[in-house]
């Protein structure tokens, strides 16, 4: 058994603001790792850029701090090349639905076996509070002084539309639930998306997070998580922001399917060697 | 038997021009010739112009040939367009229907009119290519059993019914009754001296990667680099053990996947062309500063922007060397022949491993798509540098005299951090000016180590011609072919020149400077308008240069010779 503290790195000092949601998220991750008995020697945290992007510096595991929006492609490379590694991707709302938005549907349809934690604080925090893909319409930010004109992206809705095999939402106000969701995500074989409603105490001056928090409800216990229409209904409820597991189904992962192709090719055409190919290929 | 012959086959999509070229090239290679096969496509796959040019010789073929000895053309307009390239005494092979061939009374050489269309009417429209091939082989006077074997092999490879072989035999009988072999063109029989394989530049890179034990590939399709991914897709799953080929959503993702693969300790590569290469620039800079080994093939095409996807050009050099932010250096290799595409790919992987850096193979469309005879490589004698993963330290970016640090891999070494932020020896962010200076100098030292080694071995530059000549030519990539032939012909004409072909363009080998300083004039031949290599040479070696620059299509030896005469 591992203790949560074993996943805490002392090597870099944490730069997050007081009351930043990332404190809660990192704590929840460490507890979930411990409870799932994840070997720190086989754990890789891959992240993008921004406040959430710095998580790998504070977790005692392998850490890959990639570029803005690019953690998923790098994580896919890691997981296809070494499937013994447990890969957890941490992305901000800008990473996941702004600059890196094009990668998400292609990573999810691979059903590659990793956990995708979207830290959604509705704002670009590290650069000083600019509008982000999940900022609510009308809100004032430092680049939308007279209000944001765009409708926000819904991470859960998009994930359901892409039939992601595990879709959950938690918030930094409910850390016990968040630990549980992260544990389920870690145990899920396939792409596990966890949308975390987070707080930016520095730049969310209009208390968007607190407004949202008032709408948060637990997903009812009788929800059938294998039913995509039921999950969509919960997600589209105009009055409530549900937290819990929206959807979970089991299907072959990318690596399962890649193995089938490797076996099929060998069965159909026979095993060959590089030496033979170099001799004979014309 | 002939010593040197050029054949051009010109038509429209659907005439089977590429099929004719492929089969003829294989058969002529088996007849003991060195072969170069250049395929030219219109931008559209069907309905556009398609042409093949084949040159065979007893000596290594450096260039496809400016004018041709045999022209086979299927339409009145393709005859007209290509006739100017036919030598005066060259053979024109056309259909015997008047609408398929214009008035060619102006052509002083022999004209061979064949009943291709009439026979196609009898055997069905899809048989046209096989009928044309039978006639052409007969007219060329080839060993018919060799060409028949080549047809059979081609049909097998493409999964096409063998009934087509009966059509081939029937067409040969018609040819024997109807045509006669062109006098003086009898190309001869297989002499059993076939020690070569026929590869395109892109195929050669794939085999180089496989010999280097690369089993991890990611790439996004783009003309003219796509055939590398297609070949990997055929081969990788059939190899013993584990392999992965990922085709992600775009080029940014492609190089991201390659970086991820490499971080686990696996050799990995990608292949792309101009616009795709540009998209990779962002993560390529990340690979430079995180010192992640990888190999990237850029098959250059016409630019800027979307440019000319099916044309060749050498205009990505500036972008390849400089196209990243900050002081990020990498290694750029430039093969000049298909054979070098193979061996320089092995070098690329070895350098990437040794110096923990991205290595770019800067090929081009002309080199990547054409097929060439390559002496069968002895794979057992090729030295391959394996990745050595350090299991004792977490100092991934440890400062050393050589600039080369211990290599760590995810899942195999003590835990470590990788970031594109300025980092310390452990890989952790460190924004102090002192640390930034230290780490910048470390990266620079790696390249000094490399440069010293190249100079010591006098490697990565090929010298040709008369070393004592005071006129020097420098060329790179596929343009070197036309220059080699020009240098040889100028020498035969009593006008000796010296030539240098650098195969590493960044960093540039210091010993190239000795060559440049020993010449009164330097002509730099490259297929771009700005004189991109010339600019790098002037910058590094402080030498004045003259240029032969244009774009559009590859150079001919005659152009190079004319330019030498003009400026000398």
Image (cartoon, rainbow, N blue to C red):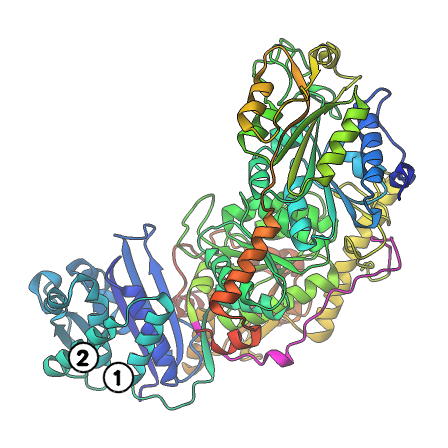
Closest to the observer: A188 or B94?
A188
Q: Which mark is residue A200?
A: none
Looking at the image, tell me whether mark 1 or mark 2 is earlier in sequence order.
Answer: 1
- Between the C-alphas of marks 1 and 2, the distance is 9 Å
Q: Which mark is residue B172?
A: 2
What segment carries the magenta color?
A: B372-400
Residue B399 belongs to the span the image colors magenta: yes
Chain hosting mark 2: B
Q: Position of residue A108 (x, y in %)?
A: 59, 38
Viewport quadrant of the N terminus of chain B: bottom left
The residue that disc 1 covers is B144
Which residue: 84% across, 34% down?
A31
Q: Position of residue B198 (x, y in %)?
A: 44, 74
Q: Position of residue A160 (x, y in %)?
A: 57, 29
Q: Are the residues at dot 1 and dot 2 in contact (C-beta closer than 8 Å)?
A: yes
Q: Residues within 10 Å of mark 2 (few under 14, many from 20)?
A: many
Q: Quadrant of residue B362?
A: bottom right
Closest to the observer: B412 or A203?
B412
Q: Are marks 1 and 2 on the same chain?
A: yes
């Amino acid at each position: 058994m591992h203790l949560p503290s074993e996943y805490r790195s002392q090597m870099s000092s944490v730069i997050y603001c007081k009351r930043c949601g990332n404190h809660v998220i990192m704590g929840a991750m460490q507890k979930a790792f411990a409870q799932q008995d994840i070997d720190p020697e086989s754990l890789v945290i891959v992240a993008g850029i921004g406040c959430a992007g710095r998580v790998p510096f504070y977790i005692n595991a392998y850490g890959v701090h990639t570029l803005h929006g690019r953690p998923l492609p790098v994580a896919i490379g890691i997981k296809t090349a070494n499937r013994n590694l447990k890969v957890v991707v941490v992305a901000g709302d800008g990473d996941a639905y702004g600059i890196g938005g094009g990668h998400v549907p292609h990573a999810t349809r691979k059903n590659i076996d990793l956990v995708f934690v979207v830290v959604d604080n509705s704002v670009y925090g590290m650069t000083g509070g600019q509008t982000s893909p999940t900022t609510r319409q009308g809100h004032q930010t430092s680049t939308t002084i007279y209000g944001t004109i765009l409708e926000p992206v819904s991470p859960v809705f998009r994930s359901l539309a892409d039939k992601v095999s595990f879709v959950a939402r938690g918030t930094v106000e409910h850390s016990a639930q968040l630990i549980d969701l992260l544990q389920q995500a870690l145990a899920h074989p396939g792409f596990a998306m966890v949308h975390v409603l987070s707080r930016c105490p520095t730049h969310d001056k209009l208390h968007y997070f607190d407004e949202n928090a008032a709408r948060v409800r637990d997903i009812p216990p009788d929800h059938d998580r294998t039913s995509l229409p039921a999950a969509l209904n919960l997600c589209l409820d105009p009055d409530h922001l549900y937290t819990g597991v929206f959807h979970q189904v089991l299907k072959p992962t990318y690596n399962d399917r890649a193995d089938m192709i490797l076996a099929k090719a060998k069965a159909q055409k026979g095993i060959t060697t590089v030496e033979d190919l170099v001799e004979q290929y014309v | 038997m002939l010593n040197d012959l050029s054949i051009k086959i010109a038509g429209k999509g659907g005439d089977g021009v590429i099929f004719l070229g492929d089969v003829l090239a294989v058969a002529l290679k088996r007849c003991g010739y060195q072969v170069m096969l250049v395929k030219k496509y219109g931008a559209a796959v069907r309905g556009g112009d398609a042409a093949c040019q084949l040159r065979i010789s007893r000596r290594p073929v450096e260039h496809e040939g400016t004018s041709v000895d045999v022209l086979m053309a299927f339409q009145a307009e393709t005859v007209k367009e290509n006739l100017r390239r036919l030598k005066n005494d060259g053979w024109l092979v056309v259909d015997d229907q008047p609408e398929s061939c214009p008035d060619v009374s102006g052509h002083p050489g022999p004209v061979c009119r064949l009943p291709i269309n009439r026979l196609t009417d009898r055997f069905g429209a899809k048989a046209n290519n096989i009928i044309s091939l039978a006639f052409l082989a007969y007219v060329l006077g080839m060993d018919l059993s060799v060409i028949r074997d080549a047809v059979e092999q081609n049909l097998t490879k493409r999964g096409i019914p063998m009934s087509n072989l009966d059509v081939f035999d029937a067409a040969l009988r018609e040819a024997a009754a109807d045509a006669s072999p062109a006098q003086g063109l009898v190309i001869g029989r297989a002499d059993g001296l076939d020690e070569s394989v026929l590869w395109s530049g892109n195929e050669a890179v794939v085999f180089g990667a496989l010999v280097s034990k690369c089993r991890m590939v990611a790439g996004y399709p783009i003309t003219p680099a796509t055939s590398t991914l297609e070949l990997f897709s055929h081969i990788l799953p059939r190899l013993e053990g584990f392999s992965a080929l990922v085709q992600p959503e775009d080029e940014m993702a492609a190089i991201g996947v390659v970086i991820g693969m490499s971080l686990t300790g696996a050799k990995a590569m990608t292949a792309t062309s101009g616009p795709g290469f540009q998209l990779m620039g962002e993560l390529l800079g990340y690979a430079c500063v995180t010192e992640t080994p990888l190999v990237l093939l850029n098959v250059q095409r016409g630019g800027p922007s979307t440019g000319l996807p099916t044309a060749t050009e050498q205009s990505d050099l500036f972008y390849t060397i400089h196209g990243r932010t900050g002081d990020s250096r990498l290694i750029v290799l430039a093969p000049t022949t298909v054979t070098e595409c193979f061996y320089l790919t092995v070098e690329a992987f070895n350098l990437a491993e040794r110096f923990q850096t991205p290595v770019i193979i800067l090929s081009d469309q002309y080199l990547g798509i054409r097929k060439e005879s390559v002496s069968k490589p002895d794979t057992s004698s090729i030295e391959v540098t394996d990745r050595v993963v350090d299991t004792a330290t977490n100092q991934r970016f440890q400062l050393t005299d050589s600039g080369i640090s211990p290599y760590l891999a995810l899942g195999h070494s003590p835990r470590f951090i990788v970031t594109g932020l300025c980092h310390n020896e452990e890989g952790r962010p460190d924004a102090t000016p002192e640390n930034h200076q230290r780490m910048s100098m470390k990266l620079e030292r790696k390249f000094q180590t490399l440069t010293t080694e190249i100079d010591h071995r006098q490697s990565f530059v090929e010298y040709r011609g008369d070393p004592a000549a005071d006129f020097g030519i420098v060329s790179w990539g596929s343009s070197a072919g036309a220059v080699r032939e020009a240098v040889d012909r100028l020498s035969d004409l009593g006008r000796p020149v010296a030539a240098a072909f650098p195969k590493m363009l960044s960093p540039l080998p210091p010993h190239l400077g000795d060559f440049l300083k020993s010449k009164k004039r330097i002509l730099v031949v490259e297929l771009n308008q700005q004189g991109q290599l010339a600019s790098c040479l002037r910058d590094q070696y402080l030498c004045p240069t003259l240029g032969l620059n244009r774009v559009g299509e590859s150079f001919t030896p005659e152009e190079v010779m004319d330019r030498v005469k003009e400026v000398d």
